[in-house]
Structure formats: C-alpha cells, structure tokens
Image (cartoon, rainbow, N blue to C red):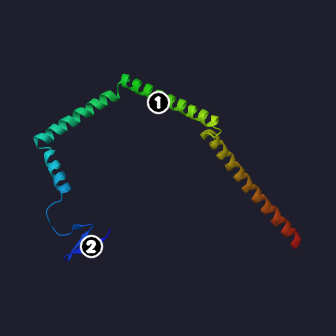
Amino acid sequence: MANTTTNGKHSVNGSSSTKGPPKLLTRAVKGLGHLLGPETPTGKAFVYLEKGITRFADKVGRSERFLDFSGKMLNQGLRTRATWVSYQEQWLRAMRLPTWSEMHEVRDELRQVRDQMEALGNQLEVVLDSIEEQRRK
C-alpha cells in the first residue's frame, strides 16, 4: 500500500486518516444493520423468514424423496461424465493423439523408471565404494 500525503494529511490508498463523512459502503452497512436489527419490523420479518427457510431446508434435506432424487441426479451426472470422457478418448485415438488415461499410464511408468534408476544409482555407489575400499587395502 502506498502512503501519500495530501495537504499534510496522511492517507493510505486515498482514504483520509482524519475523521470525515462516512464512506458509501460504511453508510450502506450501517443502514442495512439498522433495517435488519432484531427490534425493527424489517429485522423481525427477516428473522422470521430466515427461520422458516431453515425449517424448510431441514425438512427437505431429511426427505427420502429428495435424497433419492438427489442420488439419482448425482449418478446420472457421473454416468454422463464417464460417457463424455469415453467419447473424448475415442476422438483423441482417432486423431492419433494420446488420451488422458494413456498419459496417466505413461506418467506412472516414468515414475517407476525414475525410482528404479535411483535404486540402481544407490547400488552402484555401494559397489564403487566397496571396490575403492578393496583397492586401499
């Protein structure tokens, strides 16, 4: 944040550090707080509405019909995605391009080769250390 000086007053990002009229956002938040305060009619209506929506959501969330419907929609979405991925892979194969699953397999194989090379390097170091030790004797 850049501190600037304007007429001897320090400010951060253009906001004056001295008391001045409240900014628009501050006034809006204070006004909203006043409107939704628990003692005001609008606040009481908001609390009543919020409690009603919470009761409704709780009731629906425990409904067997809703849970069955949600489960069916989730399964359908997963099946649709699997079908889409299958079509994508078929298209990529037709274009002679690697598919995601093939790239994943290559990555796994490359990781295994890297691990084997590291193990061979460690074994080679042990053998070379042993040869060097025998030459010293």
Quarter of the picture holding the N terminus: bottom left
Q: Judging from the image, what secondary structure is the residue with disc 2 in?
A: strand
Q: Quadrant of residue 108?
A: top right
Residue 100 location, x and y as percent? 60, 40
User: Residue 2 sits in which quadrant?
Assistant: bottom left
Using the image as rendered, state which of residue 116 and residue 127 is in the foreground: 116
Determine which residue is flagged by label 1: 77
Q: Measured from the top left, where is residue 41 in percent x and y? A: 10, 40
Q: Earlier in the sequence, mark 1 or mark 2?
A: 2
Label 1 neighbour load within 10 Å: few <14, some 14-19, many 20+:
few
Q: Specify whether 108 is left or right of 5.
A: right
Type of amino acid under label 2: Thr
132 or 91: which is nearer to us?
91
For the point 47% across and 30% down, which residue is it?
77
Residue 38 position in % (x across, y down)? 14, 44
Tell whether 75 sits left or right of 63.
Answer: right
Label 1: state its secondary structure.
helix
Q: Tell us which disc is closer to us: 1 or 2.
A: 2
What number is the disc on residue 4? Answer: 2
Q: Say which residue appears at 61% left-offset and 32% top-offset.
A: 90
* Residue 28 picture location, percent across and down: 17, 52
> In the figure, 5 relative to 123: above or below?
below
- Label 2 neighbourhood size at 10 Å, few (<14), some (14-19), many (20+)? some
